[in-house]
Amino acid sequence: MKYRPTTAVAAAVVTGLFAAGVAPLAYSQTASVTLFGIVDAYAGRFTGAPTGVGVSDKSAIKVEGGGMSTSRFGMRGSESLGGGLNAVFELSAFFRNDTGAVGRSDAIGAPVNVAADPFFSRAAWVGLQSNDFGLLRVGNATTLLFINAITSNAFGDSTVFSPLNLVTFVGGPLTGGGSWTDSIIYNSPNWAGVTLSAATSLSENRGGSNSALRGAYTAGPFAASAAWQKVDKNPLTFADGTSPNNTRAWQLAASYDFQVVKLMGHLGEIQNRGTETGPLNIKYRIYEASAELPLGPGKVLAGYAQRKTGDAVGLVPATAAGGNKSRKVLTIGYDYALSKRTDAYVMLMRDETITNVLPGPGTLTSAKATNFGVGIRHLF
């Protein structure tokens, strides 16, 4: 459902601000507001959670929301201020369409002690945009590292089936979540295929501040990007992450579209520095390769990612999600386009973890699971 003074303006808003509004908006001569969203649901057989399989996990048949994309809805808007300058905004929320609950998670008790997702946990920002100086936003927005990952892997923003996202953002040592509150974000114009971005999330007396940088280059079928982030801010809600640990992370990405197949790869590192009262120095290296192969009305998707550390890691209970030593994820599937806005998918995923568990010391336990899901996704 849309309020739209002109169809062209609405289309410009959707194109310019899709995926957290990273790309500059098109010029607009009138004000416009667009309602948008994704509803994604799947059913399948899974062992463990997206955070990683553990040795004591048992398989279950589930119906869940957000298989290939986390279900969401929101509003975007733009108003021309004259002289090529636009005021822009976005308010968007996650929801779990299997239960109807808002957000991605309820409140988490001890020892994590973070509140549930706030309503507009995906995005809540306002800013100014111009084709000459770029886009400046203030508020809650998607992190540059997450944008770097989802724009160049075959499974996009999936946090259920994407090997890269599972080993980087779900159940691992990275802190800061997928979006930062209290942020100031700048995205440059496109200079002959080059774009630059910078972001900071102010501390507001919650530990330290967060900061991030990203650069990207696109030339025809080739694309490359690099992102770096520093997280020192302590979380209050699930949207801020679920650990007070200070972390540093970097990620390199590259892709090439050969038309018959598109190949993508990532290399990155996460450094877990612990807290001020409990310092650590554990480094995790991340490797990923994925591919899209057009076939009929859809695409065959394949990807493999691994996160591992050679450093000593702490002991965890055998019931904890696995993978504090290493995690490997392999996913193969088919995404069938029913229309321009609706697709159906089937995914087969192999999840393997090595975990340092109690009783110890040094008891390394391996766990493996083969997960299967079938789903449908609709964009509006």
Image (cartoon, rainbow, N blue to C red):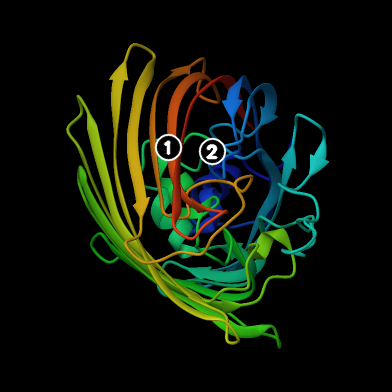
Q: Position of residue 224 (x, y in %)?
A: 25, 55
Q: Position of residue 364 (x, y in %)?
A: 43, 49
Q: Quadrant of the C terminus?
A: top right
Q: How many numbered marks, from 0 up?
A: 2
Instruction: Determine whether the residue tagged by mark 2 lies in a helix, strand or loop.
Output: loop
Q: Quadrant of the N terminus?
A: top right
Q: Position of residue 12 (x, y in %)?
A: 52, 48
Viewer-side residue, 224 vs 107: 107
Q: Earlier in the sequence, mark 2 or mark 1?
A: 2
**In the image, 339: left or right of 95?**
left
Categorize mark 2 by other alpha carbons within 10 Å: few (<14), some (14-19), many (20+).
Answer: many
Viewer-side residue, 127 vs 320: 320
Residue labelled with disc 2: 53
Instruction: Determine whether the residue tagged by mark 1 lies in a helix, strand or loop.
Output: strand
Q: Position of residue 197 (x, y in %)?
A: 41, 70
The residue shown at (57%, 86%) is 276
Residue labelled with disc 1: 352
Give the spatial CA distance, label 2 vs label 1.
7 Å
